[in-house]
Image (cartoon, helix red, strand yellow):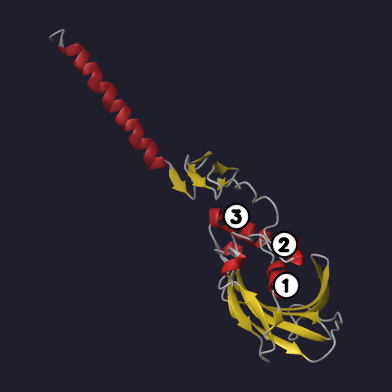
Amino acid sequence: MNKNSVPLIIVIVVVIIFTGFIWYKNATEKNVGGMITDGESVMCTMDAKICPDGSYVGRTGPQCEFAECPGEDGDPYWIEACKDGGCPDIAPFTGELSTWKRGVDTTKEVLFSYPEKIKTTYIHTTKWPPVVTLLDTPYSCTAKGTETSARGKTEEQTIAGEQYCVNTQSETAAGSVYLNYIYTSVYGDKTVRFVFGLRQPQCENYNVPEQAACEKEREKFNIGMIFYAMMASVEPSQ
């Protein structure tokens, strides 16, 4: 054998071994929802998400979810400032309040603002925009019923320091929970009523990465604060 061919043979052998290792690694590992797994251990991929402020966050935790952007670790619906006439942005679920649509109640006496859609991945509106009615009766609220009964559960709730009467009726169908809401509030010597609905999927129907994301969205989502913002926008139509 020519001595000059020995280094070349060694290089070829090394390349073959390295190529075989890479092929085996790719064949046994799976990349699912930001997780790289070989069936035993889990590693997160190195991709990043751009935040609204221009910063970047990577994947973390056992489910390799993107870390929260600055300002996302609080309740996105806590809009106490609405009381002072200026509501901050409540993204990511509804977008800028300045982009909300304008509606009129069934009696055409008051106007109100509402998000054209809620920017959620798993939770969807079913009765939207809300049907708003100005009732010529004083406000009252009597606690009664259960969510799964025909007439739902009625209770008084405190949202951002204000009292509202909330009726919630739920039913399950086709792997989803359908929630019908009736929110009522004092408006002068009358009562204003908002009627709308949501559909929430049963998160356990998804695979593991999506199940975690679904549960996280349901945990953070607060329809009461969206109502609070809509109620704060109510004003006479003339």
Find disc 1 in the rendering and name its residue. 232
- Helix, strand or loop for disc 1: helix
The answer to which image quadrant residue 134 occupies is: bottom right
Which is more N-terminal, label 3 or label 2?
Answer: 2
The x, y position of residue 29, in whole percent, is 43, 41
- Helix, strand or loop for disc 3: helix
Asked if marks 1 and 2 touch (Cβ < 8 Å), the reply is: yes
The x, y position of residue 26, in whole percent, is 38, 40
Residue appearing at x 86%, y 84% in the figure:
140
**68 relative to 235, above or below:** above
The answer to which image quadrant residue 194 occupies is: bottom right
Find disc 3 in the rendering and name its residue. 212
Find disc 2 in the rendering and name its residue. 79
Q: Is residue 77 left or right of residue 93?
A: right
Cα distance between the residues tagged 1 and 3: 33 Å
Quarter in which the N terminus is drawn: top left
Residue farthest along the top direction in this orientation: 3
- Helix, strand or loop for disc 2: loop
- Dot 1: within a 10 Å radius of its alpha carbon, few (fewer than 14), some, or many (20 or more) residues? some
Residue appearing at x 87%, y 82% in the figure:
142
Residue farthest along the left direction in this orientation: 2
